[in-house]
Amino acid sequence: MTERRLPPGSSGTTPDDTTPGRDATSAARGVLHGAEPPGGAPAPLRVITYNVRYFGHGTRGIASTSAAITRIATTLARLSPLPDLVCLQEVETQSLRSSTMNPRWHPEETQIDRLMTELHAELGRRGLRERYVAYYFPAHTYRLTSRTNIYTTGLAVIARDTFRIGHHNAERPHDITHRQRVKSLKQTRICAHVSFEHESGQSFDVFNTHLSLPSVFSREFWTGEARMGFGPNQLEEARVLADFVRREQRSDSFIVVGDFNSLPGSPVDRFLREEIGFVDAFAKVRCLSESEARAFPTAGFMNLRMHLDHVYSSERLQWLDFTGTHPFGHKGEFAGLSDHVPLIARCRLPGRSR
């Protein structure tokens, strides 16, 4: 669990602060914020998956900036309804890239610490009492010396502090990397897993991941028309991911989200949907074919626009909408903050049996 310290003079509060009237406020907000509606069905969950590009989009990923962290935290805090879960990809700990243009407020501060500080400060300024807990999952470290990192990679899962945590693998995220050539240089890819218990008593699992790009060493990379999700290395990582989900899920209700670097209809996408049985929530809610889903870009590189981010789940979840999700390059709350846009979805957990 991360530290969430506030800078001097901030009006925000940390999750450990006691806030009078919090229970009454949460109850008054009802269905949108966790209270169980009549009929035994838990309130909808608002879930976000977002590749934040190490909070360095303004420098083309060369260095993180404090402005990027503040803007993303502020935008999250201004969403209505507020999210219940936020899954992030491309998050650092401490490195030259993360701190050269973004000095740390205290020696132990990491990117997720700063994000949580800014998030809770903005919630406090807006008079909101909701608070969150964050877990960081380290993936890879490129070192200059034993004490200095050039840059690091990792994932994060942020959740309301009203959810109970049954299990997480933050200390040892699952390695899904397919290593074939230049093994010592291959960036580690992982899957983060957190098992939650909702206020209603329902359990559900969240898996957050970031697959590799297609390998340039494969013949398919140079001979095929499409590449993203067509790499044999990507398909192998998808197999490892699916096996991990099957083995580690604590509940029949689970969500698998992240940056899959794979197009709708690619071998990776079809494997997860057709062979494993994952539900593509975005395509299901929007009633989209593979080609129609491809036409909705979630990421951009130079003039390229691609649908690379996905929200998959088990069949037990009822997906309601993707309100607040905008195509990359279009206007929206998150426009210009990363080379990806977040997928923002609402789902409902199955009701309890009576």
Image (cartoon, helix red, strand yellow):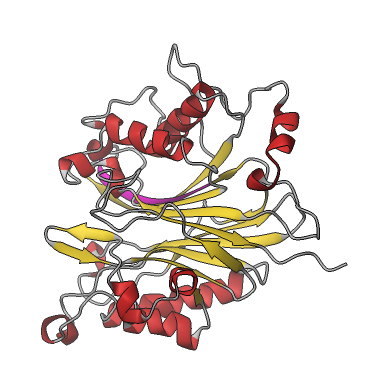
User: In the displayed structure, does residue 175 sit left or right of residue 261?
Assistant: right
Q: Is residue 9 above or below residue 288?
A: above
Q: Which quadrant would residue 59 be assigned to in this image?
A: top left
Q: Could you tell me what secondary structure mostly forms the magenta stretch? A: strand
Outermost residue, right side? 354
- For the N terminus, the image quarter is top right
Q: Residue at x 20, y 70 (%)?
A: 182
Outermost residue, top side? 9
**Percent x, y of residue 112:** 42, 39
User: In the displayed structure, does residue 325 sit left or right of residue 303?
Assistant: right
- For the C terminus, the image quarter is bottom right
**Percent x, y of residue 263:** 30, 74
User: In the displayed structure, does residue 276 sit left or right of residue 98?
Assistant: right
Q: Is residue 129 above or below residue 48?
A: above
* Residue situated in front as seen by the camera: 65 or 31: 31
Q: How many marks?
A: 0
* Residue situated in front as seen by the camera: 224 or 326: 326
Q: Residue at x 37, y 80 (%)?
A: 289
**Percent x, y of residue 38:** 80, 55
The magenta stretch is: 148-158
Q: Is residue 298 above or below residue 15?
A: below
Q: Residue at x 47, y 87 (%)?
A: 274
Q: Which quadrant would residue 132 be assigned to in this image?
A: top right
Does residue 87 show up? Answer: yes
Q: Is residue 168 above or below residue 263?
A: above
Does residue 263 show up? Answer: no
**Percent x, y of residue 157:** 50, 50
153 falls in the magenta region: yes
287 falls in the magenta region: no
Q: Residue at x 49, y 77 (%)?
A: 242
